[in-house]
Amino acid sequence: LDKGQRSARRVGENIHCHVKGDVIGQLQSQHYAFGLILALLQQFSTMPPAHTHQPHALNWISAYCSFHLAEPLLVADLANRANLSQSHFNALFRKRFGTSPHQYVMRLRIQRAQELLQHPHHSLTHIAQLCGFADVHHFSKAFKRLTTYTPGAYRALMHQQAPHTRGHESP
């Protein structure tokens, strides 16, 4: 049988399985339908093959950086993980995320710090460590540069804005 005859046969099998109406028949029907669609796409598709160095190839970056914020995240290491030269990685990254890798990581670190600052039991030193800053001074400078607040002022502001969300009830 040629491809056209096989496709016609699959359509018939698909209809038969769908008409049966039971769960297995419906699953078989879907299986045949996907097979038919795949065969048609393979035969008639004019889409170029996917390139591994397209911006979508960097989809892992957000999760990787978020899980490794406490560690040094060097552009050279990220480029190496992506199997790209550092300059090519920088260009693709900027195209995909609209910013440099360093600025992106810094923004993630500050966002994480903002979350942690809402909990008074974390010291600024501990937050700096959890967010990958070398020390409290570096953390405070970076935080103020991106938010216009010092970490302490941000924490106080958050505490003032949401005292009722901390589980305290008025007498």
Image (tube, grey):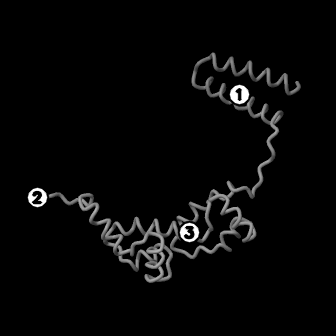
Give amino acid for label 1.
Tyr
Q: Quadrant of residue 105?
A: bottom right
- Screen quadrant of the N terminus: top right
Location of residue 97 in the rendering, given as x and y in whole percent from the top left corner: 62, 60
In the image, residue 60 above or below residue 18: below
Q: Residues within 10 Å of mark 2 (few under 14, many from 20)?
A: few
* Disc number placed over residue 105 in the picture, else none: 3
Q: Which residue is mark 2?
A: 171
Q: Decide which of 169, 1 is in the foreground and name it.
A: 169
Numbered circle sitting on residue 32: 1
Placement of 63 over or under 44, stated as above or below = below
* Neighbours of disc 1 within 10 Å: few (<14), some (14-19), many (20+): many
Q: Secondary structure at mark 2?
A: loop
- Is 4 left, or right, of 98 in this rendering? right
- The image position of residue 132, as x and y in percent, is 50, 75
Residue type, numbered disc 2? Pro
Q: Earlier in the sequence, mark 2 or mark 3?
A: 3
Front residue of this view, candidates 163 and 51? 163
Answer with left or right where residue 159 lies relative to residue 41: left
SS type, badge 3: helix
Of labels 1 and 3, earlier in sequence is 1
Q: Position of residue 62 (x, y in %)?
A: 57, 61
The mark tally for this picture is 3
Q: Residue at 41%, 67% (x, y): give it.
A: 114
Determine the residue positioned at 66% across, 63% down.
94
Which quarter of the rendering shows the C terminus? bottom left
